[in-house]
Amino acid sequence: MTDAVVPGAPVPSLVRWGRSPDADLVYRTIVTCGPRTATRLGRDLGLPHRRVRDALAELHTFGAVRTDHQRRWLARPPDQVVAALRTGRLRLVDRTEQAERHHHLVGQLVPAHALVLGSGIQHLPSRQAARDRLATLVAVERYEHLAMNTEQSIAAEVARAAIPIHRALLARGVRTRALGPPPADGDTLRPEVRELRELRVEERQALDVPLKLFVIDRRVALFPVVPHDFDRGFLEISQPPIVEALLAQFERHWELATHPQEHPMSQIVLTSREQALIALLVQGHTDHTAARELQIGVRTVTKILRGLMDRLEVDNRFQLGLALGTLRAARLPSRPSTSPPQESR
């Protein structure tokens, strides 16, 4: 493990990758403040020794930290840690397992003797045929649009094709729910994917997604004949018992899924007075000198800081500083002050 951690480099949230908030906080502290013993970490963060120990053990399991000869904990660079977590997460979404679940589920829900074209089941022979048919169905959709996806990365052409569909649904007030695995790293930064996600009214994420599925107004369902090979076409199902069974599968996985914004760090917008206070404290002012600069009382300073801690759900000022730095709500001065503020006598 290399120790080339760049001071001040952005530290991504490990919670997004399924790690505990304590592990995220401890890792962030080591990266930001440098090597620490477990005892020092507990004192700095105001955490019991047990929680610090468990967080370090969790970080150690995927190589995020190690100890040196002085029993201090050192951090692996954030980009390496994220790369390792990303690889581990992508392994969790196993395409072979998805294919097996797909075939098993389809075999249960659509018996071979039922696959007779014209009896509520038809074969859409290509990906484009499925897109065209979906667009036709969505054009008359009135109540609810359900989508279950198995892909972690959305192709640009797929996202662009879906955007007008979701715009039309949103304009008509059709409820839209989308369920799929966590997106591949960086996928949500692409403009077409970001626009598509913004158009979806409701979205949840799960690793265990059995098949790609669209359900229109709870009366018509479409899913691929062969998982991960959409060029082989889709089946369109309108037989009520089969559609109801597919709906039950969607609802079961929807209930087990999580909202994509469930775990990221809270966002915050500082008022002008909060910004001024934080800027002074970062420069090295004490509560008293900051209060004097802002022409407010020391109790007001305490109240402002307590309010910020409550809004960001942190327990002490050290944690508050880390959280504000992570959110870029507070910045370190470009160079240290040569004459730190003095307390009035």
Image (spheres, rainbow, N blue to C red):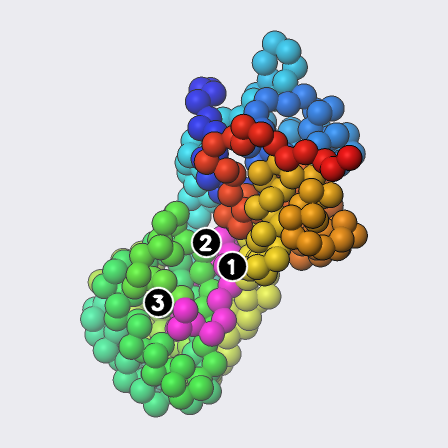
The amino acid marked with disc number 1 is Pro
Q: CA distance from mark 3 to mark 1?
A: 16 Å
207 magenta-colored? yes
Q: Which residue is mark 2?
A: 182
**Residue 95 magenta:** no
N-terminal-most mark, 3 or 1: 3
Q: Quadrant of the C terminus?
A: top right
Q: Are marks 2 and 1 in contact (CB under 8 Å)?
A: yes
SS category of the residue bearing label 1 = loop
* Relative to 270, residue 161 above or below: below
The residue located at (61%, 32%) in the rendering is 340
- Taking the view exactly as shown, the residue that stands out farthest to the top is 69
Task: Identify the amino acid type marked 2.
Answer: Pro
Q: Quadrant of residue 74?
A: top right
Q: What segment is highlighted magenta in the picture?
A: 198-214
- Whole-angstrom CA distance, mark 3 to mark 2, is 17 Å
- Where is residue 99? Give x, y as percent: 39, 54
As drawn, 108 above or below 309: below
- Compared with 52, 319 (above or below) is below
- Residue 143 screen position, x and y as percent: 46, 87
* Residue ID for mark 3: 195
Disc on res. 260: 1
Q: Position of residue 165 (x, y in %)?
A: 32, 78
Name the side, left or right, on which 144 lies relative to 309.
Answer: left
Residue visible at 58% across and 38% down?
A: 283
Query: In the structure shown, which secondary structural element does the residue marked by tag 2 occupy?
Result: loop
Q: Which of pointers 2 and 1 lies earlier in the amino acid sequence?
A: 2
**In the image, residue 225 lies at what x, y percent?**
31, 65
Specify whether 313 is left or right of 176.
right
